[in-house]
Image (cartoon, helix red, strand yellow):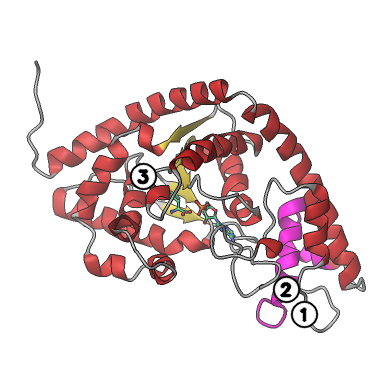
Amino acid sequence: MKIFSGIQPTGAKHLGNYSGGFRQYAATQDQGTAFFCIVDLHSITVAHDPEDLRERTLDLAALMFATGLDPERSTVFVQSHVTAHAEAAWLLGCVASYGELQRMTQFKDKAGKQTSVSAGLFIYPVLMVGDILLYQTDIVPIGDDQRQHLELTRDVAERFNSRFGETFTVPKGVYPEAGARIMDLQQPENKMSTTGGNPQGTIYLLDPPEVVRKKLKTAVTDSGREIVHDSNEKAGISNLIEVMTVATGETIAEVEKRYVGAGYGQFKSDVGDALVELLEPIQARFRALRDDSAELERMLAIGAAKAREVSAPTLEKMYDRMGFTRPKGV
Ligand code: AMP
Ligand code: TRP
């Protein structure tokens, strides 16, 4: 089984990224051959600071290892180090349609918030399609906000296969049972997010313990007093229950059972403690790894070499099936 996922080196990573991303990466790496990609080419689709991109790329690598990726088992690499990704995006951009890309809700959301929208932001989903298909991926661990992009990947893979002959495995998305969409603690109707969110309602993975506890104490809850999961009627409490499942590994039912008869105040403070317990060891590992940039760069170079080797035959096959001549010999 082949596993692939990608994550952007933009902004401070938060609990939503941990839930839909990091923790699923660590859990799925045991199921087969796993590739986890720091998608720096995706990060230039909106205005960015070059120096910041460099720093964030290494931060993210450290965070991926700190949250449990094992370099012996998983291939962790940077997208721009493997040129096949940019090439595949061009080829697949001529298979995906303009209409499909226009329907992408993430594009519409992000484009609506900017005065100048890059062409790259529009074709970004095609880059993601290529990331996944180059590795003959079976499963893609992601959060709910990537569902539409994954469906596009499946559609483009099937179209390519039927137009040019069997080339790609058609991948499946894997979403967490609870915590596929962690919401903002201050505005539980909006997802926790790097760009659009409220910093007070966002738990950053590198937030100090006292900040985490304070954000939990001031989290918005609902009228009523029962700690039960009901996303429609009790968005705030339901989200906190899911946050608790992410922190402790319990199910929603187990959390509800543990808090029968308890009050919101106690529950919020316990969720804060559970999160601190989850995050402290991750932060300690992060600091140790991040202190040694040269070692991180070495690990990423090893990852890139492996990713190049695995993706090359699929890229060749794409060129071949599409009718390109290829340079021979010399
Ligand atoms: P990004 O930082 O946008 O590259 O996202 C990395 C991963 O985190 C993706 O798999 C997203 O689906 C996931 N993710 C982002 N926000 C959330 C959220 N609020 N809840 C759950 N998963 C999320
Ligand atoms: N678009 C994804 C996000 O913003 C990141 C991503 C890029 C990705 N390529 C991918 C996720 C391939 C999974 C597989 O979160």
| Quadrant assignment, res 31 | top right
The verdict on residue 218 being magenta is: no
- Between 285 and 177, the residue placed more toward the observer is 285
Q: Position of residue 190 (x, y in %)?
A: 59, 71
- Which residue appears at 9% of the width and 23% of the height? 328
Instruction: Tell me, for residue 222, which label it has, or none.
Output: 1
Overall secondary structure of the magenta section: helix
Task: Find out whether the residues at labels 3 and 2 contact each other: C-beta distance under 8 Å.
Answer: no
- Helix, strand or loop at label 2? It is helix
- Which residue appears at 69% of the width and 64% of the height? 201
- Between 142 and 137, the residue placed more toward the observer is 142
Residue on which disc 3 sits: 131
| Quadrant assignment, res 133 | top left
Position of 206 compared to 221: left or right?
left
- Dot placed on the residue nearer the N-terminal end, 1 or 3: 3
The verdict on residue 254 being magenta is: yes
- Helix, strand or loop at label 3? It is helix
Task: Find out whether the residues at labels 2 and 1 contact each other: C-beta distance under 8 Å.
Answer: yes
| Quadrant assignment, res 70 | top right
Q: Position of residue 113 (x, y in %)?
A: 44, 69
* Residues drawn in magenta: 229-256
Amino acid type, residue under disc 2 in the picture? Gly
Residue on which disc 2 sits: 236
| Numbered disc in front, either 1 or 3 | 1
Mark 3 C-beta closer than 8 Å to ligand 2: yes
Q: Position of residue 302 (x, y in %)?
A: 45, 22
Q: Is residue 137 visible?
A: yes
- Which residue appears at 39% of the width and 60% of the height? 149
80 relative to 111, above or below: above
State the separation of the CA atoms marked 2 and 1.
6 Å
Q: Residues within 10 Å of mark 3 (few under 14, many from 20)?
A: many
- Location of the C terminus by quadrant is top left
